[in-house]
Amino acid sequence: MRVIVFGALLVAAAAWLGGRSARAAEFTIAPDEVVGRIDEKIYGQFLEHIYHSVNGGLWGEMIWDRSFEGGAAAGGAEWRTEGAELVQEGPADNVRLVFGDRNWTDYEFTLQARKTGGEEGFLVLFRVVDDKQFYWVNLGGWGNARHAVERSIKGQARWGTVGPRPAGKIDEGRWYRIRVRCQGPHFQVWLDDQRIIDFTDDAQAHLAGRVGVGTWRTQARFRNIRVSSLDGKTLLEGLPPLPPQAGGLHSWQPYGPGKVGTVSAAAEALNGEKCREVVSDGGETGLAQTPLAVRAGETYYGSLWARGEAAADGLVVRLLDGTKTLAEKTLAKTGDAWHDLLFEFKPDAGCDNATIQVGLRGKGRVWFDQVSLMAESSRKTGGFRPDLLKAIADLRPPVIRWPGGCYASLYRWKDGIGPQHQRVKYPRPMWDDVDVNSFGTDEFLRLCRAVGAEPLIVINIGMHDPKENRSSYLRDACDWVRYCNGPAASEWGGVRAANGHPEPYKVRYWEIDNETWRLAPDEYAAAVREFVPAMKKADPGIIVAACGSGGLGPAGRGQEYNRAVIRDAAKHFDYISTHHYENPANYASGPERAEAFLRETGGIIAASANPGVRIYHSEWNAQSTDWRTGLYAGGLLNAFERLGDIVGMAGPALFLRHVSARAWDNAFINFDHRIWFPAPNYVVMKLWRVHYAPLRVKMTGDAGPLSAVATKAEDGKTLYLKAVNPTGEAAAVALVAKEGFAVGGASMQLVAADTLDARNTLDEPERIRPIAAPVEVLGQTVRFSLPRYSAAAVTIRRR
């Protein structure tokens, strides 16, 4: 896998000039004929708290799980054994315990399971190749409403349902008998001796793999676990081995001869539900976390909240490179009340995988909570990790949507304002984390100002709560508008001023929750009619988006949902927010399907009581980080530009993602604790954004399979052509500019890869990148070659 290099492009251009190209395209551009205006907000972004995008990523806090609530790499799983039972007590989603032999092929997996709490049922895994290639039976999934097999395959960002999806639920307090049978691509599932699923996966079946059990926001017990070959031979029987309790990288690890425990009582903790207790009779005992990236000569500002009894020099914090001490500080003596103990490090040597220790020396008993460490370079940016902040700024997003996504639908914004040590955690684990609300409204708005973006805030209408509780969510939504936009003399404006920002933020864009499809469209429309007038009483100038469809068909209720919401509530909103995630195999055809769907949506709007509503395509992507997602991004962005009359705003997802994440491998910005790399969708979107111009001009010619859009700068001095060649053969392109625009010169930036599965990585972050490519100008004609699987932006300057 390599980038098409400049020399190869010269060969392609020579082939064009010699008439040997397999495909040719000629376009005539009429610079004086403007056919549409393009809103730059189609180049927006969407920042959700997902897979450590913020907490453990963009926000410059270097410590994970700073308040000991369980939000590290383990994702909130709590496995243990009790007698002959395997117990999972954590509340997280996507909790898995995998065991057995990956070479197992045809077998039966039997067990019993009992739900002890939570929202859904059980995950029973089979044919597990690795974290990204597996099947599981999801019993009581989708809000405890149905059962189905889901499959995850290589190159796909997320698993998807295969086979039948019978209705069903899992009740608490009773044992269920479960049997899964795998025979080649044929799978059968029994629940309490009733066969509920029977199908053959002829497409991309995994034919061998391990087994496992898991939960999704549910606590459960498992027993009588057995795997047998189809001839009855026992392959495994009994309880599987447990994973390490600490949960891997970024989690807190105890060290020393004393005792380290977790106190799960809000009355004992500083600001959450948990803190850690350390007891020592001598020596040093404490907690350690790895890895942290520290740089020689950089100052790091830290804080540790502690209480209890310790000697005058009994509390210590240090940075280690293996066993070598990089920096160490002794902290002041604490007492019965919580104290904020501040410290600074300035190590002489750097380390990519340093360890921080917080410890108790000698005899004593102390409690720790909220450990914090931030580099001076992050403080200077306003609290953001500098390299990730620059990665965002380089995309020049005109608008950023926040905080979700699914995350928004449980978010309580008041938990994320004020002093950090007074903030409490997000209501439940989500996306491999227990978010501690270190990044709230003020931090988000600071980010928007740092990168020059308009903020768009998604409110929580309480759709996961009973209707009788909705009034509290309505009050919160109105208070949020007042906090952001009210004068300092008002109640919530005064709170904002006390938090350091006396001037109103003037947030214009607001969205009424996210993916509200669990509500009937008439019920959601009623919520829009209730929330929007109340929010506009707080600020009449706000601009509102309402939720529309997800996907291009019935799975996300499609046009049925859009039509109903537009019919029943269009007078109350300015944008309808649609979502669609595409299979990466459809990198060429997907943009065309999306364009047709959005054009159809525009027709529904035009016939409505509010034809001025515009589409906000607020979540889009192809579910991969290989080159296909770059081709898809270019094609879809071209579609948005062609749809400038109806699409006024858009933003992809995921935006940022830590590489430890177990799903959703489609992010634009991918990072670990040290460095980051851009996925191809980032590369192409950045190239398109740099070559944005607001005026779409008339272009004629047969594009064939190519995707192309011509635009003009406001001053009329520059033309741009943004083109995608999603085919397996090169294309020779000729652009003819009509008289009236004298062509004075041209240049091209090209992104191409010789295989569709090419991708950037942490080790090779620039494998896929734009390069300058040759163009030929002959009078009013500009000629160039588009290699196979390529995306390019051509600039034509007026003489």
Image: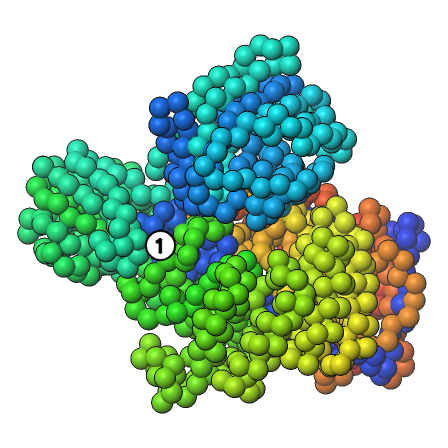
Q: Is residue 604 above or below residue 210?
A: below
Question: Where does the image place residue 414, in percent across and percent down from the top left?
Answer: 39, 69
Question: Where does the image place residue 145, in percent across and percent down from the top left?
Answer: 61, 46
Place residue 550 in its image quadrant. bottom right
Which secondary structure, mark 1? loop
The residue beneath circle 1 is 62
User: What scheme was used to colour the molecule?
Assistant: rainbow
Counting other residues with Cα less than 10 Å from the Cα at mark 1, is it few (<14), some (14-19), or many (20 or more)?
A: many
Disc 1 marks a residue whose amino acid type is Met
Q: Nearer the viewer, residue 380 or 590?
A: 590
Dividing the image into 4 quarters, which one contains the N terminus?
top right
Seen at 57% across and 31% down, the residue is: 125
Left or right: 33 with respect to 432? right
Place residue 102 in its image quadrant. top right
Q: Nearer the viewer, residue 414 or 637?
A: 414
Place residue 778 in its image quadrant. bottom right
Q: Nearer the viewer, residue 645 or 451?
A: 645
Can I make out residue 74 in this image?
Answer: no
Dividing the image into 4 quarters, which one contains the C terminus?
bottom right
Q: Is residue 261 above or below residue 424?
A: above
Question: Where does the image place residue 605, in percent across and percent down from the top left?
Answer: 77, 75
Seen at 75% across and 29% down, the residue is: 200
Seen at 51% across and 40% down, the residue is: 171
Can I make out residue 570 in this image?
Answer: yes
Seen at 47% across and 40% down, the residue is: 172
